[in-house]
Amino acid sequence: MTRHDAGRPGPEGLTQAPPRRQLLSGDDAVALGALHAGVRLGTGYPGTPSTEILETLAQLGGPAQWSPNEKVALEVAIGVAFAGARALVTMKHVGLNVAADPLFTAAYTDVDGGLVVVSADDPGLASSQNEQDNRHYARAAALPMLEPADSQEAYDYTRLAFELSERWRIPVLLRLTTRVCHAKTVVQPRAPSPRGTEPSFRRDIPGRVMIPAYAKPAHHRLRAKLAEIAAWNEAEGPNRIHNGSAALGIVATGVAAMHAREAAPGARMITIGLTYPLPIETIRRFAAGVGRLLVIEEGDPVLVEALRAAGISAEGKPEMYRFGELNVARVRRILNRDATPEPVPPRGKPPELCQGCSHREVFELLRDLGCIVAGDIGCYTLGVLPPFSAMDTCVCMGAAIGVGLGLRHVLPESEARRVVSVIGDSTFVHSGLTGLAEMVYNPPSTGHVVLILDNGTTAMTGLQEHPGTGRTLSHEPTQRLSFEAVARAMGVQNVHVVERGDGTLARLLPELLALNQTSLVVARQPCVLAAPKIRFYEKTAAEKLTTCEAVGEGSSHA
Ligand SMILES: Cc1ncc(C[n+]2csc(CCOP(=O)(O)OP(=O)(O)O)c2C)c(N)n1
Ligand code: SF4
């Protein structure tokens, strides 16, 4: 979901009851698959193209919650799995970088309940800062990876992922890509699994406490599990052979397999569903039976290199097709070994901040003050574009504070004094808190100024709640994290909360930049798209409270 289609209605006609065929997006299919698999908790952090999975799970009545970031989401899910229950974790591809620390070691542990980690990759950078190919994570973390090609497979593989996870007591990666997440195809659901045994704690110190003495044998166990999974994949894995002419044999995965079928309907093709560990002997047999062997894969040459490493001589795509999404036309070019320049698509309208967006006046101010802006990721990243051109760096979520501090440490004083770190509210909770600790711990000699643009929502990904909004994923009231209280407790020297739009920020910012002190300004004003919804949630919560109080009063008199 993008910031402009926030608040969408629920997936049309999506119900829990099988076996009615339904037209679902891949994200919705994962949610339904998880629900039918008896998932006990879905956790995650928003990020296109994965966001709708948890939103749909919640709409279906499933247990779903946003975490402050992907690492915490995975850690909560690991706890659920250690308690013997099924857990689903969702994130976009770069989220897996944040969650990588627990992921790599969770691979060593023997989970009891199924643990499925969804990585939604964004080849072509429809809405991301890079187009990393998370298939590399499967090999690096030594975890099985399933790659659905459409919504039916998204549903089926979600359920399969839970089964594999429990059978081998290992987390399973489910890798989606933008097209699979957002395209709608028909899904035939199956009867839901009977709800398993109730969660309970079973002590397993060597299986879950990863000190070296236990981690060393755990690594051996992991490799043994992978060998068994590879054998299972050869014998009964979710791999499909389409019989066609032996002159051309195609090996494909994910949505690229769909494109390949359309581009070369007469070719023989093997589609790999469990792409790590590969069913390499099955592929070897397939390769022996065809003339030209071509690998069609989106992103990096992961599959073709794995085949070559196993001694299977396969043809890959020219380097130019590593970049961006594949489609049928591009696959036809790959089939024809066409490496001539591709037609340039017409330029779309450049994105811009909404009219009336409260971020606008902040970037006008930063521009007019000549600030050096260490920026971050969110709607406000658009402050980089004209007419503002007021963002100088943007690396990853939370980097604004660390990068701003680094600039302050080494720039000549006249420049250092102009550096401001600008970060959104959701991003601050995600990974800005540790940056604030760094600022207090290692303050530059000119001090520093951090500006939190608090618009009361995670606007960029479609208006999700976060710990700073004081509402849960389902917009129910919960404890609110106070940025100003946290900053004061951490020891930031100047902490200010300002409402945007009344000129206070324009007066305050130059004063703070002149100090050799650490400062945090929380600049508040709701996102214009979120404001009516926030008012509605607050009104509903107040009404509920009044009703509860009335009922409580009534019963106390009874
Ligand atoms: C590690 C990681 N997780 C998720 C995302 C997706 N994402 C980009 S910005 C953002 C948060 C934006 O919210 P906020 O900081 O409040 O700024 P706003 O868009 O509301 O202005 C998210 C979730 C990402 N880019 N990287
Ligand atoms: S933060 Fe601004 S640009 Fe983003 S959705 Fe809200 S009003 Fe629009």
Image (cartoon, rainbow, N blue to C red):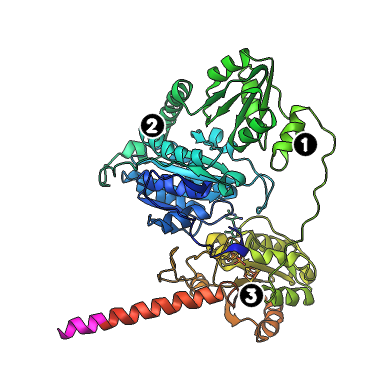
Question: Could you tell me which residue is drawn at 61 percent across and 24 percent down?
Answer: 269
Q: Is mark 1 within 8 Å of ligand 1?
A: no
Residue type at mark 1 is Met
- Answer above or below: position of 394 versus 91: below
Residue 221 lies, in percent from the top left, at: 40, 28
Q: CA distance from mark 3 to mark 2?
A: 54 Å
Quickly name the residue at label 1: 320
Q: Nearer the viewer, residue 550 or 129?
A: 550
- Answer above or below: position of 394 versus 536: above
Q: CA distance from mark 3 to mark 1?
A: 49 Å
Question: Could you tell me which residue is drawn at 45 percent across and 38 percent down?
Answer: 156
Residue type at mark 3 is Gln
Q: Is residue 239 visible?
A: yes
In the picture provided, is 422 more to the left or to the right than 76? right
- Magenta residues, as a range? 551-558
Question: Could you tell me which residue is drawn at 21 percent across and 84 percent down?
Answer: 554
Residue type at mark 2 is Trp
Secondary structure beneath label 1: helix
Res 168 label = 2
Residue 126 lies, in percent from the top left, at: 67, 51
Nearest to N terminus: mark 3 or mark 1: 1
State which mark lies toward you, 1 or 2: 1
Image quarter in which the C terminus is found? bottom left
In the picture provided, is 136 more to the left or to the right than 154? right
Res 517 label = 3
Nearest to N terminus: mark 1 or mark 2: 2
Secondary structure beneath label 3: loop
